[in-house]
DNA sequence: ACCTGAACACCGTTCAAGT
DNA sequence: ACCTGAACACCGTTCAAGT
């Protein structure tokens, strides 16, 4: 599998740097992340990372990209595990449940990797790398599909057409923000999530 | 008002540093903000800021605190300008409108000062300064009051008690995030905001 | 192809010393 | 009280040179 001789060094420096970087990110935040320190931890000179990442931002982008891939996988897995949604189709409860499942998965990711998620958002907005926006879109394609299907089945109001999709995304984003900052208003995160989805389905108006 | 003689230097270095800092923040982001550069721009030595801010984070905190004060003022002003809400009281439309007004004001702030808002959130979460969380609470006290009053008047579903407040905050946060990252799904920000508030009031379910 | 190591131009922070 | 300026320990980035 691996040759015993190490011509210069590190079988796969790139992977090692990313692994260490995520560790440091989680423990000390983006500001605490130094290329030179990563190089030191990997046992290479401070110039070595240059061969795998053009600059610090490139390493950050790679970290974010990997984060999106894992987030997408988790979201998809959560929805898959919840059933495929075209069985008997009891109409309404299914959408509420599936939205809740999705929101929970997203919030769980936000709680597990707050610094990484923050990095992902920042990288998507500020870095020029368009693979990041693509990865973001891919990760959130599932709820948009979910809503479209529900609308076709009549499980959610059809004349809302496409304009509620953004609203739902706003709610998901907001939930993740509130959860990861601990602004849950004194209740459990799970309760916050299901209450919010319920509120969204039901509306604030009386009746 | 001001003595013509400048014993050492800068009438009010603290204010000058903050002013410059916000400028740099808006134009080059937090990472582009250097204490030494600020000192240079103010015409003082690099050690001078130390007398007004213990370290870089303290300056960032001060910036965030000021941001919260201005955000709060803008949100309150927007709601005040919209009427006091206990006139005739036509019941429903009032809440929708006032929530929309509030959301628009918040989103406008997010669009005007994206970097500052990001700094505010980060500072609130990561810095130890509890005045920041207090400032955050104060800024968002208005919509919580608004909901409480609406519930008393029966303008929103009463048995939702306090558990929708967080939901509404989540929506507001999410809207600001989406707007400031340009993720508006191809429509205007104003439309996104009013659609989302409408969706929230009405609910996703048919009928 | 991958890594080293010196070099350059920056940082934040500390602290004696000045006025 | 407020500011200076040297000092220290870091950075990111570049680039010849090595293997």
Image: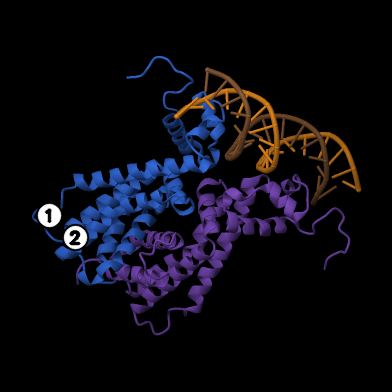
Chain colours: A blue, B purple, C orange, D brown
Residue A53 as seen in the image, left or right of residue B14: left
Locate residue D10: give its quadrant. top right
Name of the residue lying farthest toward the left = A88
Report helix, strand or loop for mark 2: helix
Q: Nearer the viewer, residue B183 or A62?
A: A62
Residue at image coords 50%, 74% = B78
Query: The disc numbered 1 marks a residue on which chain?
Result: A
Q: Are marks 1 and 2 in contact (CB under 8 Å)?
A: yes
Q: Position of residue B84 (x, y in %)?
A: 47, 79
What quarter of the picture does the N terminus of chain A occupy? Answer: top left
Q: Is residue B12 above or below residue B80?
A: above
Q: Is residue A95 visible?
A: yes
All told, the count of numbered labels is 2
Q: Is residue B155 above or below residue A45?
A: below
Binning the other alpha carbons within 10 Å of mark 1 as few (below 14), some (14 to 19) or many (20 upward) gives: few
Q: Which numbered disc covers residue A149?
A: 2
């Amino acid at each position: 599998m691996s040759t015993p001789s190490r011509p210069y060094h590190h079988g796969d420096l790139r992977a090692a740097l990313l692994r260490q970087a995520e560790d440091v990110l989680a423990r000390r935040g983006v500001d605490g992340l130094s290329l030179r320190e990563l190089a030191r931890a990997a046992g290479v000179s401070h110039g070595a990372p240059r061969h795998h990442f053009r600059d610090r931002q490139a390493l950050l982008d790679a970290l974010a990209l990997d984060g999106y891939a894992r987030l997408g996988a988790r979201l998809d897995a959560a929805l898959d595990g919840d059933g495929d949604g075209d069985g008997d189709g009891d109409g309404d409860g299914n959408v509420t449940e599936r939205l809740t499942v999705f929101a929970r998965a997203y919030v769980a990711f936000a709680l597990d990797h707050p610094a990484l998620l923050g990095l992902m958002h920042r990288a998507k907005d500020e870095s020029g790398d368009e693979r990041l926006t693509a990865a973001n879109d891919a990760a959130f394609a599932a709820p948009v599909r979910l809503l479209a299907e529900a609308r076709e089945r009549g499980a959610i109001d059809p004349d809302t057409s496409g304009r509620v999709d953004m609203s739902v995304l706003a709610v998901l984003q907001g939930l993740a923000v509130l959860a990861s900052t601990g602004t849950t208003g004194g209740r459990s995160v799970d309760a916050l999530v299901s209450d919010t989805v319920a509120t969204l389905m039901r509306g604030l108006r009386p009746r």
